[in-house]
Image (tube, rainbow, N blue to C red):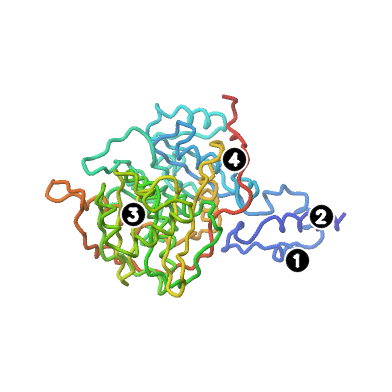
Amino acid sequence: MIKKQVEIITRVADSFSTDEIGSDLLFTRRKMLEMAGMAGLSALMDVASAPVQELVMKKPRIACLTTYWAAPRSHADWIFAKLLDGYWWQGAYMPSRVEVVSVYIHQLEESGLGQKICQAKGIPIFNSAREAVTLGGEELAVDGVVIVGEHGNYPTDLKGHWLLPRWWIYNQVIEVFERSKRAVPVFNDKHLSYNWDDAKWMFDKSRSLNFPLTGGSSIPIYYRKPAIELPDDAPIKHSVVLGGTSDEGAIFHAIDVLQAFVERRKGGETGVRSVQSIRGPETWKWVESNPWAGKLLAAVAKRFDRKPEDLQENPKTNMCIVEYNDGTMAAVIGARDVGWTYAGEIEGQEEPTIVSMLDWPGPFDQYHASNAQPHWITEMMVTGKEPFNAERLLLSTGIVNHYMESNWENGRYSPVGRRIETPVLNIKYRTTRGAQFNTGERPPSRPYIRGFDK
């Protein structure tokens, strides 16, 4: 009998890694067995007969806050469904390690799908973000917050900013943190805000209140071809990212892909000296006048068995030119049929390093890019550690913010934008993360466990 109980405890301990349990508790297999031994045989029998959830740390309780949860391809549906039902990671299904205990939907009437899912799963929908993170009380009552302020019926301004209320939702959460005198990890989908001052405030609050912050694009952690990561301190000279750049949200994906690669360059991230936007045919004139960009573009075309001019067929393309403080140059260029592709000129290598994020989205019920991201959201909620430097999220946000401003001066638009000096993007850090992208077999069609048939 006792041997069987020890086997039960051992099996439970083996099923949870230190990362899954949380580094603060250090509730490892060895400690579980030590605890059982010290407790004596009678205590061991009591523990062995207890429910499994009492043997390990309880799942973090998460508040999900969103602008809109309707169409089955909205970001809220892709991300929240994985937090509810589990996700596909490194070739296998992973059960959810968090518990969604509250929801707030800004455009509730338009979000019939979200209403049905919450009703079917018994999750309360609150009238405000504040109420969702306090569960209707006065103090913070959750272990983590997931904000998906993407999609919904929101206007764009003259410069093309989509006025999504991410800061407005985030600010309500901060008010609760400050009132409760404690804070918990926060995920913010995509860039922090369309407004630089708001974005910087959001980042600064994470540092002053000492809570982990993550977010950004799902594409840098998507499946890669080839499945490689750049080594630390790679001597990168020039970089190009080709992909969808049609609007603010699309170009953020491409810029975040760029940052995920160039932050690994020799000496670490040094910050950005300037940002410039060029739109339309002038894009290709700039490429022709900068041989390093033309060389990288030609290398990508060759990889896709195409001619360089094939990538220039889109006359409505656009680009973002980024000059870093250490002299490194990069360009994000709109191009069709290449997914998101990074090309880097690395000192000492004859040929550029080319890595593509392709073959998306797969079956929409298992949208590939929304599997790795929920994994790292969950990992942060469980461990209390940022999966990558939040400075990257701030820097990608800032590059997008200044890109959107570049084509405008004194109320007038120019397709060749002005070069904006960016001392506010003097953001330095050195990444310590390993490879984070998804690998292995792609997820099969596996409908979400919604709790209803249609």
Residue pointed to by mark 2:
5
Disc 4 secondary structure class: helix
Q: Nearer the viewer, mark 2 or mark 3?
A: 3
Residue 128: assigned label: none
Q: Residues within 10 Å of mark 1 (few under 14, many from 20)?
A: few
Left or right: residue 94 versus residue 310 is right
CB of mark 2 within 8 Å of CB of mark 4?
no
Between the residue at mark 4 and the residue at mark 1, the CA separation in whole angstroms equals 37 Å
User: Of residues 175 and 368, which is closer to you in this image?
Assistant: 368
Q: Quadrant of the N terminus?
A: bottom right
- Name the secondary structure under disc 3: helix
Of the image marks 2 and 4, the number of the one nearer the N terminus: 2
Q: Which percent across, then down, holds residue 447?
A: 60, 34
Along the line of sight, the residue nearer the viewer: 424 or 317? 317
> At x 62% / y 37%, what residue is drawn?
446
Q: Amino acid at mark 2?
A: Gln
In this view, 134 is above or below 397: above
Looking at the rendered structure, the kind of residue marked 1 is Met
Q: In the rendered image, which residue does mark 3 sit on?
A: 397
On the image, numbered disc 1 is attached to which residue? 38
Cα gap from disc 3 to disc 4, whole angstroms: 30 Å
Counting from the top left corner in percent of width and height, residue 359 is at 52, 45
Q: Residues within 10 Å of mark 2 (few under 14, many from 20)?
A: some
Foreground tag (2 vs 4):
4
- The first of marks 1 and 2 along the sequence is 2
Relative to 51, say whether 269 is above or below. below
Mark pair 1, 2: CA separation: 15 Å
The x, y position of residue 173, in whole percent, is 38, 47
Residue placed most toward the observer, 372 or 63? 372
